[in-house]
Amino acid sequence: MTEPTQPQGPESHYDREPSFSASAPTQAPAPAASAKDAANPSWERATLEKLAFAALAEQKSTRRWKTFVRLAWLAFFIALAWIGLSRAVPAPDKSTAHTAVVEIKGEIAAGADASAEFVNAAMRAAFEDEGAQAVVLLINSPGGSPVQAGMINDEVRRLKALHKKPVYAVVEETCASAAYYIAVSADQIFVDKASIVGSIGVLMDGFGFTGLMDKLGVERRLLTAGANKGLFDPFSPLSDKQKEFAQNMLDQIHSQFIAAVKAGRGQRLKENEETFSGLFWTGEKAVELGLADRLGNLDYVAREVVKAEELVDYTRRDNVAERLVKRFGAAIGDSAMRALHTAPALR
């Protein structure tokens, strides 16, 4: 029998050898080891060691760069703090006649811009300047600490006697309580007709929660060594004896305030039953009562009274770093602590 023959025709694709397109990717052959590497069986180990050392060197370089960057930033912030925390007082040309200005603005308190530390330092610089013909206290403050105000008052009188230079107080919006305590140390007080002047009194404020605690059934557990150590604790009752003690202390501070006003104003003061009651008046009325001398602003005093129109500001101000600290909460915390403090205040 004869074997059947295959049909003639196009060759089936199953019978063809597989072919690849010229564009298809091909795997590159692995590099063959050189004859020298083949002769040395540890060449792979040496290559790995070289790679490891190179990686370590790169890591060290990266760490050094990071350390440098961090030290650079640290140096920058230290320099910023050094510049920011230094409160420089301007040093004008001593040969030029001018009117020295020291601002007293905001609350008068320790650590504030209107603290005795900063105001007195600025005043000393102003008095010691040979070109300063007079010193103007530019005031816009509702008051504050009687201690700080008293320290500034004493320093103004000392510097006036030492340097024989006049001092003028110029009131902007407000000169009340502790601010007026300072103003009476000046030779003359100038106000705007609508300024608020006076409030010669002392207060001590706080809160008491004893009634609320009784209603809520809350027991206050306060242990003290000393019968009056818990005086003004807001969660403890205040006895009549403690009230009397506090009132006597306020009356004594009030008497010191009144003495400073009388010493500063002298015969110009037209005293009546309301003068030292804590009331306040407009600048126009304050002139009538002898609490102020004349109407006038800073430019008027420099031009017409001191006769030196050039103004040089000696005020020590908040620097950029301090403003940032206050903005991000330091001032809020400080204010909260002062709100809980019950020290007497002239405001």
Image (cartoon, rainbow, N blue to C red):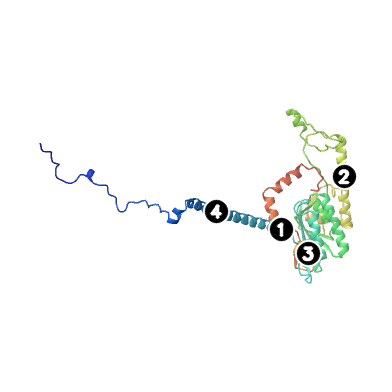
Amino acid type, callout 2? Asp
Residue 290 in sight from this viewpoint: no
Amino acid type, callout 3? Ala
Q: Position of residue 93 (x, y in %)?
A: 76, 70
Amino acid type, callout 1? Trp
Q: Position of residue 338 (x, y in %)?
A: 76, 45
Closest to the camera, between mark 1 and mark 3, is 1
Amino acid type, callout 4? Phe
N-terminal label among 3 and 4: 4
**What is the crowding at mark 2: few (fewer than 14 residues within 10 Å), some, or many (at least 20)?**
some
Distance from label 3 to label 4 (Cα)? Answer: 69 Å
Q: Is residue 21 left or right of residue 236?
A: left
Residue sitting nearer the eye, 260 or 45: 45
Residue sitting nearer the eye, 193 or 333: 333
Distance from label 2 to label 1 (Cα)? Answer: 44 Å
Residue 100 — which label?
3
- Which residue in the structure is indicated by mark 4? 53
N-terminal label among 2 and 1: 1
Local SS, label 2: helix
Local SS, label 4: helix
